Image: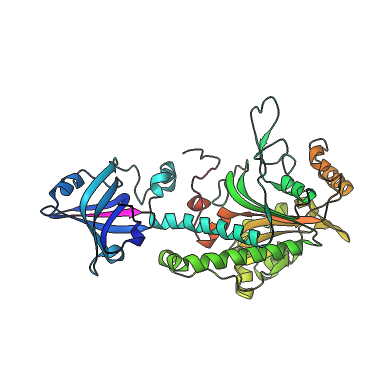
Amino acid sequence: MNRTYIKDLTEGQCKIKGMVETIRDKKIMFLVIRDVTGSVQVTVEKDKCPDVYEQAKELTPHSFVTVEGQCVFSTYVRNGGKEIYPTALEIMSIADVLPIQADSGQDLRMDYRWIDLRDDKKTFLFKIQTAFEKYAVEFFNDNGFIEIHTPKITALSSEGGSEVFELKDYFGQKAYLTQSPQLYKQMSMMAGFDKTFEIGEYFRANPSFTNRHDTEFTGIDVEISFIESHHEVMDLEEKLLTYIVKGIKKQYNDEYKKYFGKDILDIDCKIPRITLYEAYDILKNQMGHEVPRALKGDLDPDGERLICRYVKEKYGSDFVFITDFPAKARAFYSMKYEDNPEITKTYDLLFRGIEITSGAQREHRYERLKQNIAEQGIDPAVMSEYLEFFRYGAPTHGGFGLGITRTLVKLFELPSVKDVTFLFRGPNRLKP
């Protein structure tokens, strides 16, 4: 007999495989068996099936089993009104006493992450992550994008050396784990690919211990050619996010509501666009907050939260684009305004209080790039290979990088990126 997933059970003979979630052993033994689709009660009656009953006495919570038997529907039973009366039980493995409980601290639960994830709600988070990436790829395919896979070991660093992990020895050469596919996705524009995307892993040697930072994360990177301003990049990202969220909502809203008590958000209006200096003015004059001088050129975490609150109250949007950052605060490859070279054609996308995206129109002119590199004090020799991309013709282009974990943590309104990361990596977390 073939296996049936629990959500697909119908009345009659069945065979399920899963984990023993709970055991109640009185005159009749009740097992709750869980698989990735749900849970079902298995009712073991000693007088009707003594062999199975004796086997079941060996079980402990989180043991793995195969159960064959008769599935019946009953309004008196939890877990979808289904229960199984077993005729055969196969024990795959017996679990030791668990080292963590539901109320254990996060650090201990992270030590035993594979056990921590044996939970329907936590499994659901990763179903949403799967759907997020599925709808992103669907959008890109429908809109003529080419998927690329850039190297994760590189001789270049995208920001000229900041926050990178250097490999101890790459066959006698200096090499790094990539912090972004930035330079290579720009190369794809020089190759004439026109529109490219990548979903991949990236690494940041950032010693932060906040609930929104990690040293390894998954991102969606996008680059497009023949643009006239960064607003075209924002238009694209707006369409992408609208498509993704609508797809997720259609597929999973009922399940989301079961776990979180509300509907998935809608993106049913244009995402507001506010320049950085307009944001400073709003924060100071309407929110009573002034960004510290040392952080001018960006928003501090309190500023990000407050400007999102302002936008939500005024425009009803959970998202806001903050645009036009000063050149001194942005990467050398950012395009400057011709009539105001102190300001760049760049943006951040904030979602419910945190930045989830950085994007820009890129500088495509070889001599301007050389000038930008010199102005930022970067050794031109370090960027010589990158500059080669632009010597033989380059289109206008721009793009963005979207952090999936940051987006999901705010979609679910959870406290930390650890909650939506399969195996988190941070300054003090290298295992399991």
Q: Please tell me whether residue 85 is drawn above or below residue 374 in the rendered image.
A: below
Q: Does residue 259 appear left or right of residue 299 in this picture?
A: left
| Residue at the farthest top position | 172
Give whichever of 336, 71 is nearer the camera: 71
Q: Main secondary structure of the magenta part?
A: strand
Q: Is residue 30 one of those drawn in magenta?
A: yes
Where in the figure is residue 418, as x and y percent of width and height?
50, 50
| Residue 264 visible in the displayed image | no
| Residue 152 visible in the displayed image | yes
Give whichever of 210, 144 is nearer the camera: 144
Part of the protein shown in magenta = 29-36
Where in the figure is residue 251, as x and y percent of width and height?
49, 66
Give whichever of 329, 432 is nearer the camera: 432
Colouring scheme, one of rainbow, by chain, secondary structure, one colour? rainbow
Q: Please tell me whether residue 321 is drawn above or below residue 116 in the rendered image.
A: below
Q: Residue at x 56, y 68 (%)?
A: 246
Where in the figure is residue 290, as x and y percent of width and height?
68, 61
- Counting every numbered tag in the picture gives 0
The image quadrant of residue 254 is bottom left
Q: Please tell me whether residue 420 is drawn above or below residue 237 in the rendered image.
A: above
Q: Does residue 406 appear left or right of residue 390 in this picture?
A: left
Where in the figure is residue 74, as x and y percent of width and height?
23, 68
| Residue at the farthest front position | 1
Q: Residue at x 61, y 67 (%)?
A: 242
Q: Residue at x 69, y 55 (%)?
A: 400
Q: Does residue 131 appear left or right of residue 369 in this picture?
A: left
The image quadrant of residue 241 is bottom right
Q: Is residue 51 one of those drawn in magenta?
A: no
